[in-house]
């Protein structure tokens, strides 16, 4: 027993605490399985295991065992979302390594939008309040723990944030890069609204045509069609990514071109639990809870508890 809570009960309390606020977790546990635990007990158990999980992800070889044995192409994605802390709003940044098999080949926008990619065979999520300079060096160590020795086997899929590509170039040298197609499309819409007017038929037609060019010929083809002073302010987003927009080849190979994994993780791992109405966390506590939620959403939950058992 630890703090009057058995190991099996600790797992249930952590699962509930990662899913709902501590008071709702208490009510749900009593309703679901007759387990009576107050919100403070759940909070205490979650905080203790959240800190332990953060260390376990970093230090225990068992944390990467499932990932190392899985098949598929290695993807890396990263992004951040703001959380409310007693020190003000801070950015919680997530790093995701995943292995995914290839799906059905696709060509063109209509075919791409209708295809369904396989779910990742394995994924590992880490979360923390870090600057880009602090976060980048950990990616290489994270890759090594997961058995990724050759960075050229990794594909980095991310938005156009300069810090991501700068850190990826240092931590994962030689990795392939893909500019997230959804952020690229959003930038096209912003350009059309600014130059052609918001919500105009001409703007919609321009975006549809340019997105088709991007999927067919990448940033090089797109920039050729965005010549002229009117578009000069919008070209800079795509110019650094001439080598990151070979969407046609990736679609033909049945591979992903969007960073949906990390976008979903920001909403589900962090947003759904840590950004509830009125929530305001101490920094050390929100980092422990983020680690707990990250392990629960990764393929590491069972491995962690097997070690504890």
Image (spheres, rainbow, N blue to C red):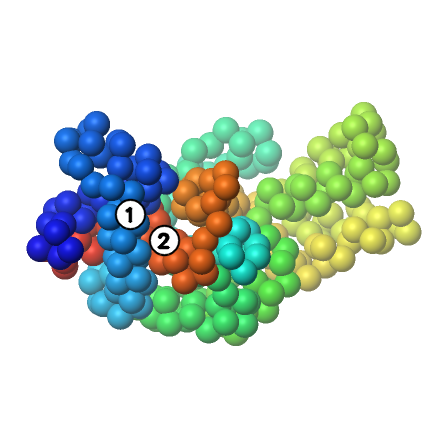
Residue at coordinates 45% horizontally, 58% vertically from top-left?
Answer: 282
Q: Residue most toward the right?
A: 229
In-front residue for pair 241/65: 65
Residue at coordinates 63% horizontally, 55% vertically from top-left?
Answer: 160
Residue at coordinates 59% horizontally, 35% vertically from top-left?
Answer: 108
Disc nearer the start of the sequence (2/1): 1
Query: Is 150 left, or right, of 129 in this rendering?
Result: left
Q: Quadrant of residue 273?
A: top left
Query: Is 158 left, or right, of 202 in this rendering?
Result: left
**Residue 270: x, y in percent?**
44, 47
Q: Quadrant of residue 133?
A: bottom right
Q: As displayed, is residue 238 above or below residue 194?
A: below
Total marks shown come to 2
**Residue 38: x, y in percent?**
24, 41
| Secondary structure type for disc 2 | helix
Query: Is 76 left, or right, of 305 in this rendering?
Result: right
In three-dimensional space, the C-alpha distance between marks 2 and 1, rounded to whole angstroms, equals 14 Å
Q: Is residue 74 visible?
A: no
Density class for disc 1 (Cα within 10 Å; few <14, some 14-19, many ≥20) is few
Closer to the camera: disc 2 or disc 1? Answer: 1
**Residue 134: x, y in percent?**
50, 71
> Which residue does the numbered mark 2 point to in the structure image?
289
In-front residue for pair 102/142: 142
| Secondary structure type for disc 1 | helix
What quarter of the picture does the N terminus occupy? bottom left
> Which residue does the numbered mark 1 point to in the structure image?
40
Q: Is residue 104 visible?
A: yes
Say the numbered circle drawn on residue 26.
Answer: none
**Residue 194: x, y in percent?**
83, 41
Residue at coordinates 43% horizontally, 33% vertically from top-left?
Answer: 116
């Amino acid at each position: 027993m630890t703090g009057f809570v058995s190991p099996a009960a600790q797992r249930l309390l952590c699962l509930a605490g990662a899913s709902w606020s501590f008071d709702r977790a208490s009510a749900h546990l009593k309703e679901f399985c007759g387990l009576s635990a107050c919100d403070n007990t759940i909070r205490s158990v979650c905080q203790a295991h959240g800190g332990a999980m953060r260390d376990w992800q970093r230090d225990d070889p068992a944390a990467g065992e499932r990932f190392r044995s899985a098949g598929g192409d290695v993807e890396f994605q990263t992004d951040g979302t703001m959380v409310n802390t007693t020190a003000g709003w801070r950015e919680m940044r997530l790093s995701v390594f995943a292995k995914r098999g290839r799906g059905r080949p696709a060509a063109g926008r209509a075919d791409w939008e209708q295809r369904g990619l396989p779910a990742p065979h394995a994924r590992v999520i880490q979360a923390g309040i870090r600057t880009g300079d602090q976060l980048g060096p950990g990616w290489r160590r994270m890759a090594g723990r997961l058995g990724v020795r050759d960075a050229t086997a990794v594909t980095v899929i991310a938005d156009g944030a300069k810090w991501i590509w700068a850190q990826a170039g240092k931590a994962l040298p030689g990795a392939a890069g893909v500019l997230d197609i959804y952020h690229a499309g959003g930038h096209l819409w912003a350009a059309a609204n600014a130059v052609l007017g918001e919500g105009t038929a001409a703007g919609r037609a321009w975006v549809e045509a340019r997105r088709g060019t991007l999927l067919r010929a990448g940033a090089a083809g797109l920039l050729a069609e965005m010549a002229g002073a009117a578009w000069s302010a919008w070209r800079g987003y795509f110019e650094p990514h001439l080598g990151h927009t070979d969407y046609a080849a990736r679609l033909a190979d049945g591979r992903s071109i969007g960073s949906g994994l990390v976008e979903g993780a920001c909403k589900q791992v962090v947003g759904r639990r840590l950004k509830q109405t009125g929530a305001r966390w101490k920094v050390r506590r929100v980092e422990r809870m983020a680690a707990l939620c990250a392990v629960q959403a990764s393929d590491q939950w069972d491995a962690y508890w097997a070690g504890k058992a």
